[in-house]
Image (spheres, rainbow, N blue to C red):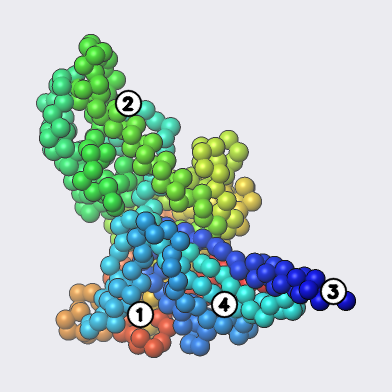
Amino acid sequence: MNFSRLSSVKTKADDLAKLTMDKHMRLAVTGLSGAGKTAFITSLVNQLLLGAENHQLPLWKLAREHRFLGAKRTQQPHLHVASFDYQGGMDALHSQPPSWPSPTHGVSEIRLKLRYTPQSMLWRKLNNTATLNLDIVDYPGEWLLDLPLLEQSYAQWCEHIESSLQDSRKTELASVWQAMVQDLDIHSIADENRMADIANTYTDYLHQCKQQLGMHHIQPGRFVLPGELAGAPVLAFFPLPAALANSPSKDKKQHKQSYLGLLEQRFEYYKEHVVKQFYQQHFIKFDRQTVLVDCLSPLNSGHDSFCDMQLAVNQILHSFNYGKTSLLRRLFAPKIDKLLFAATKADHVSIDQHSNLVQLLSEVVAEGKRHVKFEGITTDTMALASIKATQSGKAQLNGESISAIKGILQSDVESQQQTTLFPGEVPSQLPQQDFWQQQGFEFSPFQAPITSPYQALPHHRIDQAIEFLLGDKFK
């Protein structure tokens, strides 16, 4: 008997087992600013790190069957990308009084190594344990709103921005940068300092649209969330009135150095080196995606804010149009096969309103979801609270006991006084005009909960999200 040959065969089998049982998955977490991306990733990482011994994850099959052996942080694959600040988030939650983790404003990532016992008897014979390397990537949803720019010229983009100013409130906020543009001789040699001043004023206008009007559909997205591009000349452009943007230059030689020429060049550079580059470097590598949506804050802000949020979310979902003729498919060939839509901050409404919240989110994303499902992508929709800040309670309304929530409001952080309230009913469908006329919903932000560093963070349905996004990887 040739023992050396048998040994060689066994070594190859062992190597094959190790190779087969060491899986990789890349999960992208996106959402518009304020949707709760940082809280979601912090909670997800916390549940996985503590889940083997101290889990609150009954809906995650792997943990429920005691096959999850543990997780640990390991070096992320892309050293040029910022690390997700998990420890900073946990320090904030464990401070006195606790505070919410600081939001991130660019791409960041974190890698976890998950160890588990395989379900298949065949794999158990090859190897008692298996590993999933999970990369979690955080990036602003606003950056996905720039995808349509790839099919627009500078003049077409200017026409789009001009049409958005039909809203009188936007027109008022835009008055300063529009006045600066009207005084511009667009065919004269450009003054870089003046261009930067107008670009900064346009950026201020976009910030005011977000802060004062509750708008989300902001273009270009990097103007409000520049990340590593803060202060770079590539962001020193702005829209002109459509008539000016379409006006031909009389001096072809001077055109490249003129205001109009530079604006066109920078718009094209932004598309090629910022929008395309983001998709090529990150987007095509994702296996799974979760889109977080805050439906509650826009309900507070009013009809226009809610409609703008819906428009922005569906614009993001156009990034998942995997049809063979789609722009994204032609340029980047993404491979995402599962997509989770999650309505966040579910703990800020009473438990009996969660089903309404899910139905509302389903209507918000209905258009984009149809495109995604048609291409064979598995989807799910749920309401969750990444870090639960309230407890269920009861309140009296017109002499009747109703479901309510109890917690410490952000406005009561100093006194640490608990409040029990009923924020109102969440509409189960897209709100009609009478909802806004009889608005009885009031979304109140709560202080982060007091938690122990030795216990997993309290949550609503993070385990359900884990099961959907990762469950099939542990067979």
Lower position in the chain sequence, tag 2 or tag 4: 4
Viewer-side label of 3, 2 = 3
Q: Residue 2 carries which label?
A: 3
Decide: few, some or many residues near mark 3? Use Cα within 10 Å; few <14, some 14-19, many ≥20. Answer: few
Q: Is residue 416 left or right of residue 75?
A: left
Q: Which residue lies furthest to the top in this view?
A: 250
441 or 459: which is nearer to us? 459
Viewer-side label of 2, 4 = 4
Q: Quadrant of the C terminus?
A: bottom right
Q: Is residue 300 left or right of residue 45?
A: left
When asked about the image quadrant of residue 167, the answer is: top left
Would residue 403 be seen by someone viewing this image from the given angle?
no
In this figure, which residue is indicated by the disc labeled 1?
390
Q: Where does residue 341 sit, x and y in percent of width and height?
A: 49, 60
Q: In this view, does 441 lie to the left or right of 241?
A: right
Residues at marks 2 and 1, CA–CA distance in whole angstroms: 49 Å
What's the residue at 20%, 46% (across, down)?
231
Q: In this view, does 237 lie above or below 104?
A: above
Q: Are marks 4 and 3 in contact (CB under 8 Å)?
A: no
Q: Residue 115 carries which label?
A: 4
Decide: few, some or many residues near mark 4? Use Cα within 10 Å; few <14, some 14-19, many ≥20. Answer: many
Viewer-side label of 3, 1 = 3
Label 1's element?
loop
In this figure, which residue is indicated by the disc labeled 2?
155
Lower position in the chain sequence, tag 4 or tag 1: 4
- How many badges with numbers are in the image? 4
Viewer-side label of 2, 1 = 2
> Which kind of residue does numbered mark 1 sit on?
Thr
143 or 258: which is nearer to us? 258
Q: Where does residue 430 sit, x and y in percent of width and height?
A: 44, 54
Residues at marks 4 and 1, CA–CA distance in whole angstroms: 32 Å
Lower position in the chain sequence, tag 4 or tag 3: 3
